[in-house]
Amino acid sequence: MEIEDKIEHKIEILKGISNILDGKLSKINVTSFDVMSLIPIINLLGLECGIELGTSIGFSSFALLHYCPTIKKLYTIDKYEPYVDIVGDPPFVEVTLEDSSFYKKCAEKLLKSPNVNAKDRAEIIYGDTLEIAKDFENEKYDFIFMDSHLSPQQLKSELPLWYPKIRKGGIISIHDTNVKEVCDVIIEFGKENNITSHIGYFHDTALWIK
C-alpha cells in the first residue's frame, strides 16, 4: 500500500471511529464489517460469550457488541505487531509497527470508551493466538470468529487449538473464505475431525454449528 493510500485509509478509519463515538450510526455501513454474517445468528440463538481472533481496528468487535445485545462477554485477541498478510493473491498487505500501533489505539479508543456499550463486556487480550489458546477453557464459549490468520498455514495451526474451546451447539465462524486455500484448510479440518454439520458460506465467512 502506497503512503498516500495508507494516509487516506487511516483518515477513513478515524472518520468511522468518530461517527461511532458521536452516536452517528446511520453513517456506519454494517455490511462492511467482516463479522456481519455472524450477527444475525448470535441474535437468533441468544449467544452470550464469545471469542474473536484478530481485533485489528476494533470495528468487528464494536459491531458484535453493539448489534448483539445478548453478548455478555467478548474476548478479542491481537498481538499488534508488524505483519505481512499473505492470504489471497499479491500484492500482499504489509503492516508496519507504526500501523499496528495505530490499530491498537483505535481498538482501545472504541472498546474502552464510555460512549460505546462495551464496558465490562469486552476484554482485549494482547498476544499470539497460538500461545494464548492454552489460557481458555475447553467447551465453554458460545462462538468464535477467526480472522487473525495471515496465511492458510496459520489457520491450520489455530483451528485445532481453538475449536475445542467452543461448546457443543456453539458457532464456529472463519473469515477469508473467498480464498480457496482457506476453504481447503476448513474442509480438511472437517474431514479429520468427522464434522458432519452443514458449513454455510456468506460474506467471505464459513459458519457451522459444532
Image (tube, rainbow, N blue to C red):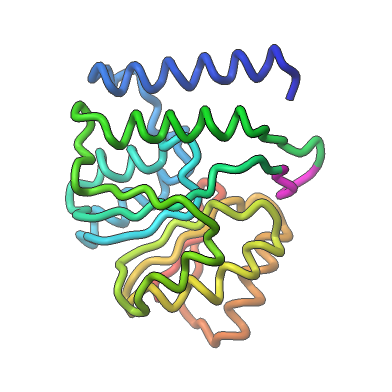
**Whole-percent x, y for residue 21 in the image:** 28, 21
Q: Nearer the viewer, residue 75 or 33?
A: 75
**Magenta stretch contains residue 152:** no
Q: Quadrant of the N terminus?
A: top right
- In the displayed structure image, the side of residue 20 where residue 157 appears, left or right: right
**Whole-percent x, y for residue 33 in the image:** 45, 37
Q: Main secondary structure of the magenta part?
A: loop
- In the displayed structure image, the side of residue 58 where residue 151 appears, left or right: right
Q: Nearer the viewer, residue 167 or 77?
A: 77
Q: Quadrant of residue 44?
A: bottom left
Query: For the point 19% across and 29% down, which residue is it?
Result: 114
Q: Tell me: residue 77, above or below residue 14.
A: below
Query: For the point 66% across and 76% down, which residue is it?
Result: 188
Q: Tell me: residue 24, above or below residue 72.
A: above
- The residue stretch that appears in magenta: 84-89
Query: For the point 50% across and 32% down, which residue is it?
Result: 103
**Whole-percent x, y for residue 108 in the image:** 37, 34
Regarding residue 201, the answer to whether it shows in the image is no
